[in-house]
Image (tube, rainbow, N blue to C red):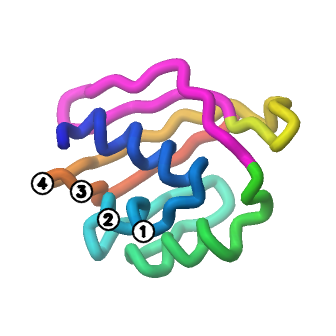
Amino acid sequence: MDSEAVVRAYYDSIDAHDYETFAGLFAPNVVHERPDRTIEGRDTLVSFMRDDRPNKETSHELSRVEENGESVVAEGRLLDADGDTMFAFEDDFTVVDGRIARIRTRTR
């Protein structure tokens, strides 16, 4: 799977609550830098997304996914269960050997 496909699978698996697929997308030592916290390690990230994130009934509407040198940039909106925009985001992914090694999230 190429880097762009890995990133698209990241959003698809979160939205589908498919945490087995989600877990398989990451390097064991993945780091996710978010505005509210930094999450380190695949198991910790999967646990957070599955059990601890504040709102699990969301979906991602992507407006752009583009390889940019060594990273993949994704932009879009996070929507609530009613389809209303919660916020806009930009995620920068580092994908190494087909696995996500780092994510930096910015929100607007």
- The kind of secondary structure the magenta stretch mainly shows is strand
Contact between marks 1 and 2 (CB within 8 A): the answer is: yes
Q: Which residue is mark 4?
A: 97
User: Could you tell me the amino acid type at mark 1?
Assistant: Glu
Q: Secondary structure at mark 4?
A: loop
The percent coordinates of residue 54 (x first, y second) are 78, 64
Q: Is residue 85 left or right of residue 34?
A: right
Contact between marks 1 and 4 (CB within 8 A): the answer is: no
- Relative to 40, say whether 91 is above or below: above
Q: Earlier in the sequence, mark 1 or mark 3?
A: 1
Q: Is residue 13 left or right of residue 37?
A: left
The percent coordinates of residue 53 (x first, y second) are 70, 66
Give the residues drawn in magenta, as a range: 58-77
Q: Which residue is mark 1?
A: 20
Contact between marks 3 and 4 (CB within 8 A): the answer is: yes
Residue 99, numbered label: 3
Q: Residue at x 49, y 71 (%)?
A: 45
Q: Magenta stretch: residue 5 in it?
A: no
Q: Secondary structure at mark 2?
A: helix
Q: Secondary structure at mark 3?
A: strand
Give me the C-alpha separation between circle 1 and circle 4: 19 Å
Q: Residue 50 occupies which quadrant of the picture? A: bottom right
